[in-house]
Amino acid sequence: MSAQSGAASDTFALRLEIDDDTLASCVGCGMCLPHCPTYRVTGEESASPRGRIAMMRDVTELGTADDAFVEFMDACIQCRGCETACPAGVNYGEMMEATREALATQTSYQPTIRRAAYRILGMPRLLSASSRLLALAQRLGVLRLAGWLGRRRSLRSLAGAVEALPTVPLRQRPLKASGDDVWLFTGCVMDAWMRDTHRAAQQVIEATGAGVALPPLGAACCGALHVHAGLGAQARRLAQRVIAALPGEAPILVDSAGCGAAMKEYGHLLGTVEAEQFAARVLDIHEWLAARVDDLPQRPTQAGSEALRVAVQDPCHLRHVQQAHLSVRTVLGRYTEIAELDDDGLCCGAGGAYAQQHPEIAAAVRDRKVAAIERTGAGVVASANPGCMLHLRAAGLTVRHPIEIVAEYLPPS
């Protein structure tokens, strides 16, 4: 197992802001172990939720940590499948977030270049310009360009990183608001790279008779990736911006499972009544549509035609955090035949930025998911989270957002 550690020495001072009662909530029963992707891959106790909590207890008692602690904390995908399996209701996600924030504020755990990259997510104009440059670099063949510039290892590494990213669009048509019944949250990377998914979401929402409002630039990033990285101060600033940018009482619909999970936890993140009230307005788009599924058109049928068979992959933050994964089946099942996986919702290994930072573990976790998908015999995979979609596509699968599939069955507007 490898992880990037920013610790300056083998042992260093570290103060975790986790109270004793929270740490004691884990009774070490081991029910989490089969549901932890990193434990399943490595077989190491310290790579399990139970093992990581034990390490947190030791650090809290001693006031010091070491490189191994940083590695095992960093190597957690934060899928939170352990929370669903835990009979004691341990809030593992909150403990992991507190631990990473302690590392990020008290050590050099997050290097400067990575902090800068996260900061760009909250700057929509800069993100858009950077995405266009990335798209151009991909089309020019950045590996060949690096060869022309020289043989420096740093250039080759940069070229390899760019080539490993999904193909980024050069141009994207803008979305146009159609009303004020609901907000459609568009976010940062997804809007920059996958705006067609938002376009499909708007089309499906409007098919129920509702008008769609689009967020201003102030709601450019929800802060989910920042929370995962331990950059709590940045995450809180972004959350406050999002809340201010989406006033009123209209529901806020989110078509990215990771963003929706983060926004539903704004009350915990900010600790204010305003944040709690805002979080109560946030719904995964499938939750909102499931309650209005009869308002959607019926699937057009032709003689002898069969419904498309689709394997549904549950993003962890939709299944374990939002617990809204069944709504996907309600909406998608109106138009397709659902093929269920037999892996009990095990993580696919994407984990936001995790797959880029821990590619070997992420690939090993994904292999299990791919095997489960292939056992269904379905030719198409539906996943309601952009990170999962891109990670599974990299394995050669045909992966689409459920809303995009539904939109294809709607009559032309």
Image (spheres, rainbow, N blue to C red):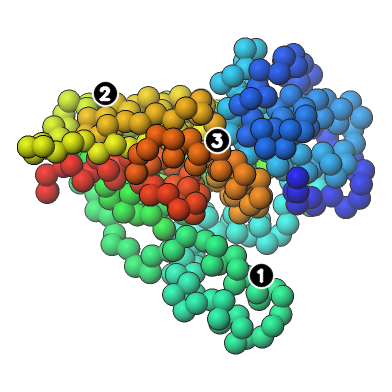
Using the rendered image of the protein, determine whether residue 260 is visible from the camera's viewpoint.
no
Q: Which residue is label 1 attached to? A: 157
Which tag, 2 or 1, sits closer to the chain's start? 1
For residue 229, what is the image quadrant? top right
Q: Distance between the residues labelled 3 and 2?
A: 27 Å
Report which residue position mark 3 lands on: 347
**Disc number placed over residue 291 in the picture, else none:** 2
Residues marked 3 and 2 touching at CB (< 8 Å): no
Which callout, 2 or 1, points to the residue nearer the camera? 1
Whether 389 is drawn above or below 159: the answer is: above
Mark 2 nearby-residue class (10 Å; few <14, some 14–19, many ≥20) = few
Label pair 2/1, CB-CB below 8 angstroms? no
Up the image or down, 20 lies above or below 383; here it is above
The residue under the point 12% across, 48% down is 413
Are there few (<14), some (14-19), or many (20+) residues within 10 Å of tag 3? many
Q: Is residue 211 left or right of residue 350?
A: left
* In front: label 3 or label 2: 3
- Determine the secondary structure under disc 2: loop
Secondary structure at numbered mark 3: loop
Separation of marks 3 and 1 at Cα, in angstroms: 28 Å
Determine the residue positioned at 32% across, 37% down. Answer: 310
In the picture, which quadrant includes the N terminus? top right
Label 1 sits on a secondary structure element that is: helix
